[in-house]
Image (cartoon, rainbow, N blue to C red):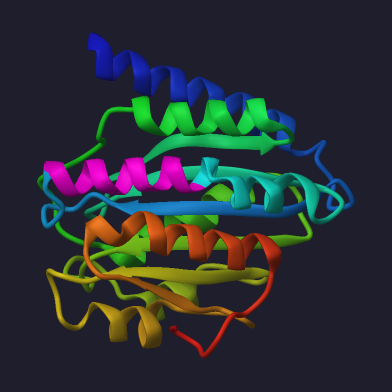
Amino acid sequence: MGEHGEHRALVRALALLATLWAGAAGAAECRLALLLALDVSSSVDAEEHALQREGLAAALAAPEIRRAILGEAPGHVVLAVYEWSGRNQQDVVLPWTVLDGDAAIDRAAAALRGAPRAFSRFPTAVGYALGFGVGMFRRGPDCARRVLDVSGDGIGNDGFEPVHAYRHFDFSGVTVNGLAVGGHDPQVRDYYMFELRRGPGAFVEYAEGYADFRRAMERKLLREIRGMVIGRAGD
């Protein structure tokens, strides 16, 4: 099967176990289901992918993020991560995981660092990525808030657009935020602001290239975990 195949088989098995477990997690215990979607389309080269993956892992393990996850409100945070690209290219990197202590956060960060890249030679199907995310929420835990956090460096160029995803999939109770990464497409920030962002309090964070990804992700995670808005929309 090979190393990558074995890893993906393990992830799918864990995802199945998470699905079976999810029904037991009620909204009273879970305050936030946070689902992160990472762009791995052909515009993201190997160095940029490493910066993105390491930036997310480091942001998740940062002291201020830990405090927000573990000590600032009752109930726990549940996290999942998937990579997305073309129409049929979505792959779960981290299945639904309860972040109920430092050890759980450390394990999640290590899993993100160690997982192989899912895809590298496909276009950017944002609508399909959104549809996949809704499916993960349907199979996920019952939490007081549900947030889909989409990162990417370009506009959709394959399949249907976000407006069609929002029309045909059930996004009730789901907030969609964006992390637009500059450097490849000058339209990406506006696209994330006016096409992708959805729901009360939804916002778009901006990174000045992948070298800035960790800083932007830390700021974004804090806003999402705390459920607060900082500055103007899109700041």
Task: Pick the quarter of the image with the C terminus.
Answer: bottom left
What span is colored magenta in the figure? 46-59
Residue 47 image offset from top left, x and y in percent: 14, 44
Mainly helix, strand or loop, the magenta region? Answer: helix
Identify the residue at horizontal 34%, vertical 40% (top origin). Answer: 54
Q: Is residue 92 visible?
A: yes
Q: Is residue 28 magenta?
A: no
Corner quadrant of residue 100: top right
Q: Is residue 54 magenta?
A: yes
As drawn, 32 above or below 170:
above
Identify the residue at horizontal 60%, vertical 68% (top origin). Answer: 223
Residue placed most toward the observer, 53 or 156: 53
As drawn, 9 above or below 212:
above
As drawn, 96 above or below 44:
above
As drawn, 6 above or below 169:
above
Corner quadrant of residue 226: bottom right
Q: Could you tell whether 73 is left or right of 193 in the image?
A: right
